[in-house]
Image (cartoon, helix red, strand yellow):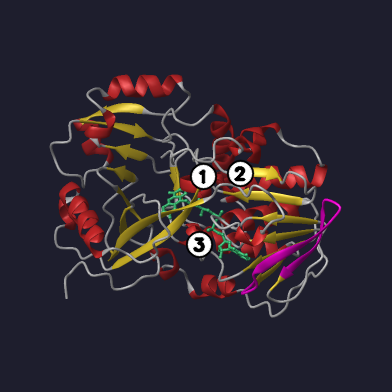
Amino acid sequence: MNRETPLATDSVWFATLTPAEQAVLACPERQIAHRTPDVLVVGGGLVGLAIGYFLAERGAKVQVIEGKRLASGASGANAGGIWPNDQGPLHPSGFHALAFLSRDLWGRLSLRPEFDFDWRVNGLLNVNAERIGPSAAEVAARLQELGYAVQGVDAEQIARLEPALRSGLTYGLHLPSEAHLHPVKAVVSLVRASCRRGVGIKVGVAATGLQLRQGRITGVETTAGPIEARHVVAATGWSAAWLGKVISPLPPLRAVSGQLISTPPLPPLLKGTVAGQFLVFQLRSGEVVTGPDVVESDRLTPDPALSVQFADAARELIPALRDVPFDRAWCGIRPGTPDGLPVIDRAANVENLWLACGHFKNGVLLAPGTGKLLADWIVTGTRPEELLPFAADRFNSASRLPLRE
Ligand SMILES: Cc1cc2nc3c(=O)[nH]c(=O)nc-3n(C[C@H](O)[C@H](O)[C@H](O)COP(=O)(O)OP(=O)(O)OC[C@H]3O[C@@H](n4cnc5c(N)ncnc54)[C@H](O)[C@@H]3O)c2cc1C
């Protein structure tokens, strides 16, 4: 068998949980705890679970339903990067406000007793000269003016920051305040903390339709019978089909696949995330992960040729990986939108339906900010101004724009 043939298709995140964490994730609830909650959250990814957690913190009675298993979408397949400074000048300033609020919330959550998700502020080092261009100092100065924490570094600094990288890297960009987390441990933490606050979390139950009367949802049809909720939140990643004809037009969501590969546990090699041709980082438990690609498709089967390309690039960048196998490959589907920004809004014409979808490449980063601000809006009835850039109607005339990476 080719050394690069994937041996496992599940992500490294599930493989590195403790038995106690696996038990939390399995969510043993046999029944739907709340048939008449204040808020029904549909979708058990990081976004839906963060919304449920922050709603419960504000005293709401919350039920979450998840059609498959918790974190079975992009939330269980991503790179775990909390990289608000590595966004380039593309996004409007509204993105920055939500991204930095959210990063700060992750940092604060990491200190709470129920939360344990390998939070590390370990920086990101970009050594991709092709992407940086001829002068790191100029790029850094421009990005600093836009408010990002980034500095140019030379060969000596690169060697000090990441001694395992090959020699001959002459310049790069260092983003010292970027962070990293274990996304499925973050899911487990949110579940643990939410359950303590009375949130019902039921897996294996999908929403299939909505009953509507006079501009309000009166009931949600699910595979386990109807649920009557005062508010309904759609946090279903890239799929909004279950909303049917209730909202028109549906948010222009698109599936954007990405693949990653990993090694078995290794002794410490990398301190932070390194961006070469692809991203490379090491888990606290030792596995080195590299990838991903960005392809507009709903592909969930890893491509062996791509795994070889990722592995070759990682070995070229980090000589100590030369004889190390990459024995795990997996794919996830990012919930894309035409402008790469999420939709976090109240549905037009349905006063008790809320949308929190389309978080694309940044849903891990943005989950707590989305959860906190949407919970504030639902509970107080006042829209936080940080959410204005994420209105659904911005696509009414632009839904055919090409995907912006
Ligand atoms: C390869 C890759 C790398 C990434 N790297 C990063 C990164 O480094 N940093 C970052 O911030 N983001 C990253 N992302 C993006 C991030 O993973 C996503 O934006 C985020 O996980 C989206 O979370 P979500 O909860 O909205 O969606 P999902 O995690 O997709 O969750 C949606 C859930 O809804 C459920 N569902 C769907 N329909 C129904 C229904 N009708 N009824 C009940 N349940 C339903 C699904 O089963 C699913 O579990 C990456 C993504 C990929 C694929």
> x, y (%) of residue 222?
70, 71
- Identify residue type, mark 3: Gly
* Neighbour tally class for label 2: few under 14, some 14-19, many 20 plus, Cα within 10 Å: many
Depicted 298 relative to depicted 373: above or below: below
* Neighbour tally class for label 3: few under 14, some 14-19, many 20 plus, Cα within 10 Å: many
State whether residue 125 appears in this view: yes
Q: Between disc 3 and disc 1, whose residue precedes?
A: 3
Is the residue marked 1 within 8 Å of ligand 1, measured from its CB?
no
Q: Secondary structure at mark 2?
A: strand
Q: In this figure, which residue is indicated by the disc labeled 2?
A: 343
> x, y (%) of residue 180?
44, 48
Circles 1 and 2: CB atoms closer than 8 Å = yes
Task: Name the mark nearer the viewer: 2 or 3.
Answer: 2
* Neighbour tally class for label 1: few under 14, some 14-19, many 20 plus, Cα within 10 Å: many
Q: In this figure, which residue is indicated by the disc labeled 1?
A: 337
- Identify residue type, mark 2: Val
Instruction: Give the Cα separation between the discs numbered 1 and 2.
Output: 8 Å
Name the residue at 66% across, 36% down. 387
Return the residue nearer the eye: 56 or 340.
Answer: 340
Q: In this figure, which residue is indicated by the disc labeled 3?
A: 73
Circles 2 and 3: CB atoms closer than 8 Å = no
